[in-house]
Image (spheres, rainbow, N blue to C red):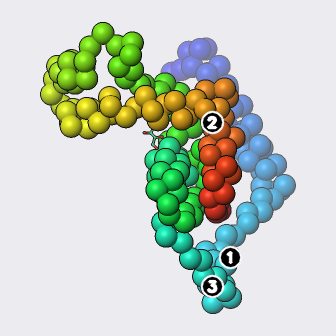
Amino acid sequence: MKNKTDISMTRRHFLGLSGGVIAATALASVGFKYHESKNEREIDPNSMKLKENETDVLVIGGGMAGLFAAVKAHDAGSKVTLVSKGRLGSSGATPFAKGIFSYDSTSESMTVDEFVTQVSKSAINTNNPTYTKQMAENSKASVDELRKWGFFDSPLYNKSFSKPMKERNIEVKES
Ligand SMILES: Cc1cc2nc3c(=O)[nH]c(=O)nc-3n(C[C@H](O)[C@H](O)[C@H](O)COP(=O)(O)OP(=O)(O)OC[C@H]3O[C@@H](n4cnc5c(N)ncnc54)[C@H](O)[C@@H]3O)c2cc1C
């Protein structure tokens, strides 16, 4: 035997259920169209033409590493081409790098070796001390170059990355 509360719950349940059925019927009458996606390539590789480019150094990637590789290879006397699947300075992990570190021997209280010891201690020796030393010795010069190109003037890096490339007439191919 059901009490009053049980009956009212049943009614509510019935109304909810019938509302759902009405809504489903209404949606079915609207009719959904789904676009069948065919897994076909849009570019026919057989229709592509090959173009030969000649260069001494081909740099792949327009992030921080690619930028310095291209600039340094050019400055060492090579003809350089940089290709990137994204825009120079605006793709990959580089746009996220906001905190740039440099070791400045003119203002640091520690020597390079003391600095390496300190970093190794705080990293519980998980760091590579050779790399840490190279970073300490070379970071200031790289940061100074970035500053000269306007890297710290804007949170967007395409302009500052393009500056040294344009100045050197380094070919950049972005896709
Ligand atoms: C969230 C976040 C925060 C960070 N913060 C800091 C920070 O504060 N300070 C700091 O020093 N570092 C920071 N880093 C690390 C720093 O961003 C990276 O170490 C650095 O940007 C790596 O540079 P990269 O040139 O090696 O790689 P990327 O910047 O990833 O560049 C790779 C480039 O290669 C291109 N590419 C990829 N595949 C191909 C392909 N097949 N063909 C052609 N081009 C291709 C990409 O489009 C891109 O241009 C951070 C990283 C992340 C993810």
**Disc 1 Cβ-to-ligand 1 distance below 8 Å:** no
CA–CA distance in space, label 3 to label 1? 18 Å
The residue carrying mark 3 is 50
Looking at the image, is 88 positioned above or below residue 100? below
Q: Look at label 1 and name its amino acid.
A: Glu
User: How packed is label 3: few (under 14 Cα within 10 Å), some, or many (20 or more)?
Assistant: few
Q: Do the numbered discs 2 and 1 sit on residues whose CB atoms are within 8 Å?
A: no
Ranked by sequence position, the earlier of labels 2 and 1 is 1
CA–CA distance in space, label 2 to label 1? 39 Å
Give the camera-side residue of 102 and 125.
102
Position in image of residue 78 (x %, y %): 50, 63
Residue at horizontal 73 percent and vertical 63 percent from the top: 34
Q: Secondary structure at mark 2?
A: loop
Q: Secondary structure at mark 3?
A: loop
**Outermost residue, front side:** 77
Q: Which one is in front in this view, the residue at disc 3 or the one at disc 1?
A: 3
Residue at horizontal 77 percent and vertical 55 percent from the top: 28
Q: Do the numbered discs 3 and 1 sit on residues whose CB atoms are within 8 Å?
A: no
Give the camera-side residue of 96 and 3.
96
Quadrant holding the C terminus: bottom right
Q: Secondary structure at mark 1?
A: loop
Q: Look at label 2 and name its amino acid.
A: Trp
Ranked by sequence position, the earlier of labels 2 and 3 is 3
Position in image of residue 66 (x %, y %): 50, 51
Give the camera-side residue of 91 and 29.
91
Q: Look at label 3 and name its amino acid.
A: Leu
Q: How many marks?
A: 3
The residue carrying mark 2 is 149
The residue carrying mark 1 is 42
User: How packed is label 1: few (under 14 Cα within 10 Å), some, or many (20 or more)?
Assistant: few
